[in-house]
Image: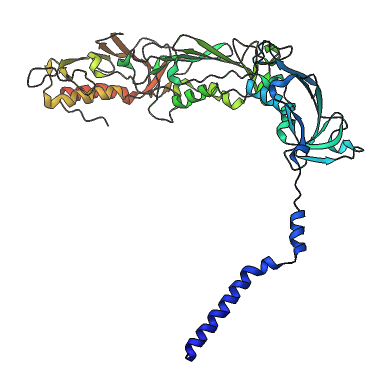
């Protein structure tokens, strides 16, 4: 064996010794250390921590006493429905009630803290915070006393009558024993979507603030969306983006059905200012069913009382949920002068400041090479729109001129509502559209207002808006450009 090979063998032997030492030495520590590690984590027989073992169905009555209020739970005559004694007509949330019963049926504690009963005050058990007395169907009864929460924990100190021990139980035992009628009431919830509704009305201080109508497939000729503002004026709603004011408001209104806690299940509405509600929101479903929510003003505790009009159960809601009542109607509507699809218009008559002109609009079905009516992707006939200007029909190459003029009318912007003290005189101009379908006519009128604006009145509303004079006068100028075939694309 040469020297190099012998050195390699020696190195391999040393490596084996090191590995064996690394693996085995921890197992060769003194036996008393291992015993100490075991005895540091004693086990407890679970049976020693079980102080009651029934099912929720085996509780005949459960009396809860907390904060001066006594609440008695029991089963109705059907043996299945849990009710509150003295309030049998109030629907109770069965899941919550059953959980309350269960925590007095199956009582398993986490720790037996002490058998020294000389200073119960330190645990809140000298004058217990909560008392729960359960009567079981086997004729026995048990009374459980709950004290304070264990500091830095979600647990409660507890005692059981007849057992001289201070116990520790999990939070659900103490929190369930605090339940009163208000905590147990079945909250009236509604799963509502905007498409489920036909009308929405908002009242404030007994006055109509706003109302909205879902027109669905009706009057599509003058509406680009499904909903219109119907009070305080009749206008199309701006729903062109997810962040539009109407989309924001409709979401806020639907959130009103997310009920917060019960405030009082047996109180008088008058106690909470609900005999004369501050705000009322009325929802009419597509089926015709009406659901009304009534709200009081914010109280000194920073909450608003609310109720359904057909119920006396009073809930609480956050004042921030009622911010919708400050919405300005004009912020919700489309600001364009009008929204009417040209395919429903047969004639436009202009007078006064917008010029004295009449534009005829024709609509003819398109045919394919075989003489069949062309259909669009929705299966509807394709219609060709034509324009007759001063008795002359625009050629195919000129039709964009007529379309651009029509767009120039539509995109005239309404700037804001006219001042409340505005008094309209005689109209100084108008644009009247003759329609092929009901309402068969749509007329916009213009009035003198001030040096910068004209007042504008649109159909279905007594409210006046204002539009910049330059934008209104431009309609006349654009029609004169149409006569000369010099209209420029308006956007």
Front residue of 63/435: it is: 63
Note whether residue 330 is visible: yes
Outermost residue to the right: 118
Front residue of 271/351: it is: 271
Q: Quadrant of the C terminus?
A: top left
Report how many numbered discs are placed on residues in the image. Answer: 0
* Quarter of the view holding residue 375: top left
Front residue of 181/33: it is: 33
Q: Is 177 placed left or right of 166 in the picture?
A: left
Percent x, y of residue 3 = 49, 91
Outermost residue to the bottom: 2
Outermost residue to the left: 370
Q: How is the image coloured?
A: rainbow
Q: Is 126 placed left or right of 440 in the picture?
A: right
Percent x, y of residue 328 = 49, 22
Percent x, y of residue 127 = 87, 30
Is 155 situated above or below 338? below
* Quarter of the view holding residue 59: top right
Percent x, y of residue 133 = 80, 23
Q: Residue at x 51, y 22 (%)?
A: 254
Is 15 situated above or below 47? below
Note whether residue 297 is visible: no
* Quarter of the view holding residue 264: top right
């Amino acid at each position: 064996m040469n020297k190099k090979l012998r050195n390699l063998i020696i190195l391999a032997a040393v490596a084996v010794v090191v590995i064996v030492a690394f693996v085995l030495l921890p197992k060769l520590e003194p036996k008393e250390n291992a015993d100490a590690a075991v005895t540091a984590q004693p086990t407890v027989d679970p049976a020693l921590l079980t102080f009651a073992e029934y099912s929720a169905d085996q509780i005949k009555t459960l009396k809860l006493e907390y904060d001066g209020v006594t609440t008695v739970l029991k089963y109705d005559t059907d043996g299945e429905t849990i009710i509150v004694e003295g309030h049998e007509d109030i629907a109770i949330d069965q899941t919550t009630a059953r959980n309350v019963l269960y925590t007095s049926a199956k009582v398993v504690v986490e720790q037996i803290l002490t058998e020294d009963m000389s200073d119960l005050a330190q645990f809140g058990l000298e004058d217990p915070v909560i008392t729960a007395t359960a009567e079981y169907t086997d004729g026995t009864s048990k009374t459980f006393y709950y004290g304070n929460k264990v500091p830095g924990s979600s647990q409660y100190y507890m005692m059981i009558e007849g057992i001289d021990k201070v116990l520790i139980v999990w939070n659900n035992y103490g929190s369930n024993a605090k339940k009163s009628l208000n905590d147990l009431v079945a909250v009236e919830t509604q799963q509502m979507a905007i498409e489920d509704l036909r009308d929405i009305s908002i009242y404030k201080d007994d006055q109509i603030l706003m109302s909205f109508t879902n027109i669905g497939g009706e009057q599509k000729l003058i509406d680009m969306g499904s909903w219109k503002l119907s009070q305080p004026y009749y206008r199309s709603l701006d729903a062109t983006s997810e962040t539009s004011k109407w989309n924001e408001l409709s979401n806020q209104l639907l959130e009103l059905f997310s009920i917060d806690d019960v405030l009082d299940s047996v109180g008088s509405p008058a106690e909470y200012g609900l005999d004369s509600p501050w705000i009322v929101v009325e929802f009419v479903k597509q089926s015709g069913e009406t659901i009304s929510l009534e709200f009081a003003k914010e109280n000194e505790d920073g909450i608003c009382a609310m109720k359904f009009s057909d119920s006396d159960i009073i809930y609480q809601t956050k004042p921030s949920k009622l911010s919708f009542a400050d919405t300005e109607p004009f912020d919700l509507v489309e600001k364009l002068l009008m929204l009417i699809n040209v395919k429903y218009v047969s004639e436009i008559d202009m007078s006064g400041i917008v010029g004295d002109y009449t534009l005829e609009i024709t609509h003819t079905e398109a045919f394919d090479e075989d003489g069949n009516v062309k259909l669009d992707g929705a299966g509807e006939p394709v219609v060709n729109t034509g324009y007759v200007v001063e008795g002359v029909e625009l050629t195919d190459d000129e039709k964009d001129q007529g379309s651009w003029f029509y767009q120039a009318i539509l995109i005239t912007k309404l700037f804001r509502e006219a001042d409340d003290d505005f008094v309209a005189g005689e109209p100084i101009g108008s644009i009247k559209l003759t329609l092929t379908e009901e309402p068969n006519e749509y007329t916009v009128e213009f009035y003198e207002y001030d040096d910068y604006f004209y007042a504008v009145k649109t159909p279905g509303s007594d409210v006046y808006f204002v539009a910049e004079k330059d934008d209104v006068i431009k309609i006349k100028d654009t029609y004169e450009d149409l006569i000369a075939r010099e209209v420029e694309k308006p956007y």
